[in-house]
Amino acid sequence: MKSILKYMFFMWIVSLTSCIHKDEEYAPLINYLESPELISTIEDGDFILFEEDAADTLFELSWNQADFGYDAAISYVVELDELGNDFSNSLEILNANTFSMTLTVQSLNEFLTIMGMEPYVKKDMELRVSGVVGDAAQRQSSNVISFKVVPYKLKLAPIYMLGSGTVVGWDNVNPVEVPHLYDKVYGTVSTFIPNEWYKFIRDPGTWAPMWGSDGTGNNASGILQYRATDADSDPASIPTPDTEGDYRVLVDIQNMTYAVYPIPGTVYLSLGNSSSDLFSFSQTDVGIYHLEIDFDGSSAGWNIYAGTSIEEVPLWGTDENGSYNWGQLVYSENAEGTQPLSIASPQQAGTYLVTINFIENTYTVILK
């Protein structure tokens, strides 16, 4: 009898021990054998973002598989942060089980906007990718890729221009886009056919809402008249200038006014507002001009002129918010009367790319 009891007690102990070991879970051994290596198609690492290029691929990222020493389901997190933060305030722009990522102009600009980056100001940024398997293991982070970028400001939807004086005619399906600039003011630079007509519409493919003239204006300025629906009377068309060429058009739908002035085919940067120190821009598109120039770090400011004489021609400067690397252009018909502020020169000597955008009415200055 004692033998039977001993045997039963022994079997109970074995059974209990077996159950304990069966339910016990062991954490895998983590060796952190290999971090992912980040590879990028970034070449010069210096980008100016433009809204018209939103759909373009800016650069691509790819990486290899991380190795945690055991068979794990690994997610990859791509982090974006300002240089110098050591990713302490980073934005996760991807979290997925994948080995590549494409960044478009629009996607990067949206990420920078979310991060509160000021538009039209160059920022030093950095990227890295980390392999993640959960809370039990620390992230395996890659090498860091850095770049410089100038984001643009997200704006309201554009309005559109059409008419016999424009390059599209009265085609309301494919009208000329007129971007929003600020405070319900829209503007663009467009080629006008002389002594013809044009109007503005809100949406392609429709004839209302529409803005035309109240009939009292001319080809340089006037009062707008609004047409809300097709049932409302059709406003008069706005006359185009007498001479064919590129013109800046401003449409203020809050104050109901329009203004037009010519944009020259050649513009010059005048350093120190001197006729003897002029640099010619290259026109790369309607209303877009570029110039590579060496600044020596001096305090001499500069302006944009429509010709080689700074005494009699239109000029552009900036306002009190303008800086050496970005600002709004301010127009003056001639060198008489109140003048716009000169644009400050960079204090760091070097070669810079100066971009004049008469469509957005801005300038940017980027160190090459």
Image (cartoon, rainbow, N blue to C red):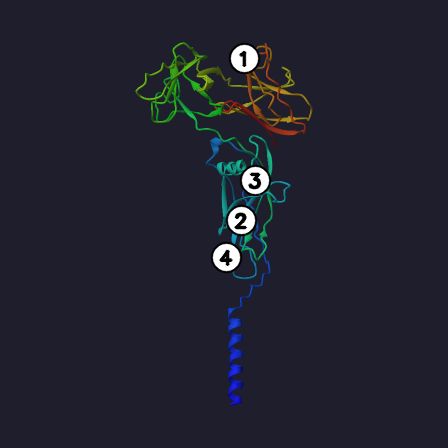
Q: Which residue in the rendered view is the most extreme toward the bottom?
A: 1
CA separation in Å, label 2 and label 3: 23 Å
Q: How far apart are marks 1 and 4 (CA)?
A: 66 Å
| Mark 1 residue crowding within 10 angstroms, few (<14) / some (14–19) / many (20+) | some
Please report the residue visible at 51 percent of the width from the left and 69 percent of the height from the top: 23
Q: What element carries label 1?
A: loop
Distance between mark 2 and mark 1 Cα atoms: 53 Å
Q: Which x, y percent locates residue 26?
A: 55, 66
Q: Residue furthest front?
A: 1
Residue under the image location 51 percent in, 46 percent down: 94
Badge 3 is on which residue? 43
What's the mark number on residue 333? 1
Q: Is mark 4 on a helix, strand or loop?
A: loop
Q: Which amino acid does label 1 sit on?
A: Glu
Residue 77, numbered label: 2
CB-based contact (under 8 Å), mark 2 and mark 3? no
Query: Which of the two discs, 3 and 4, labels the residue nearer the N terminus?
Result: 3
Disc 3 vs disc 1: which is toward the camera?
A: 1
Q: How crowded is mark 3: few (under 14 residues within 10 Å), some or many (20 or more)?
A: few
**Rendered view: 330 above or below 31:** above
Q: Which of marks 1 and 4 is nearer the N terminus?
A: 4
**Residue depth check, mark 3 versus mark 4: number of the one nearer the observer:** 4
Inter-mark Cα distance, 3 to 4: 32 Å
Amino acid type assigned to the residue bearing label 2 in the image? Val
Residue identified by numbered label 4: 73
Label whose residue precedes the other's in the sequence (3 or 1): 3
Q: In which quarter of the image is the C terminus?
A: top right
